[in-house]
Amino acid sequence: MKIWGRANSINVMKVLWCADECGLKYERENVGMAFGGNDQKWYLDMNPNGVVPTIDDGGRVIWESNSCVRYLAAKYAAGTLWPNDPGQRSEADRWMDWQLSTISEPMRVIFWGLVRTPAEKRDMAAIKKGAADAGKLWARLDQKLEGRLYVAGQHLTMGDIPIGCFVHRWYALDIERPELK
């Protein structure tokens, strides 16, 4: 298996974590941002969006990080990361979608504002609002986790991987945040 993407991309982190949980051997090639390559024809032929990650599993090419996680979980971790029970799997799916559709935007505002923007150009009001908005959303997840260890129950599933990557980033950022369990 080959994975294209830089290790500091949160979307690549999801795929690497999932591949590791599945016990897969893979080769990773740095692509994107400072490494470039994702605007080249060879890459765009695999991934027309020109973003990372992209994986090639024996000729099957997959892009979009959560799609990669779902594919790897279904193929290599059925019954564990990929729950057999459709209800439990739908919970994992919902939280993966929540990561993309809901928490991603305020987290992007904070991350890009603090990490990718020079200090003199930062919009601290937008960053503070992003942190407040994200804090409310993380509190919803915290409430949902009451009485369970993971987003879809008592065992790690594919749904925890995107959430876990974003939680890690949340706690790594130098911001005020609410106290969560």
Image (cartoon, rainbow, N blue to C red):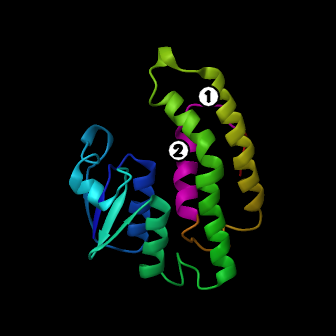
The one nearer the camera, 17 or 59, is: 59
Dividing the picture into quarters, in which one does residue 157 lie?
bottom right
Question: In the visual, does 120 lie left or right of 34?
Answer: right
Kindly identify which residue carries mark 2.
Answer: 169
Dividing the picture into quarters, in which one does residue 123 lie?
top right
> Does 106 appear above or below 148?
above
* Magenta region, residue range: 160-177
- The residue under the point 28% across, 45% down is 39
Question: How much space separates mark 1 and mark 2, taking CA atoms?
Answer: 14 Å
Question: In the visual, does 152 lie left or right of 15?
Answer: right
- Picture coordinates of residue 81 (x, y %)? 52, 75
Question: In the visual, does 36 lie left or right of 115?
Answer: left
Checking the image for residue 17, the label placed there is none
- Picture coordinates of residue 33 (x, y %)? 32, 40
- Picture coordinates of residue 110 (x, y %)? 57, 34
- The residue under the point 71% across, 68% down is 148
- The residue under the point 26% across, 50% down is 30
| Mark 1 residue type | Ile
Kindly identify which residue carries mark 1.
Answer: 127
Residue 169 is a magenta residue: yes
Task: Kindly report the secondary structure that dominates the magenta region of the rendered protein.
Answer: helix
- Picture coordinates of residue 144 (x, y %)? 76, 61
Residue furthest to the top? 120
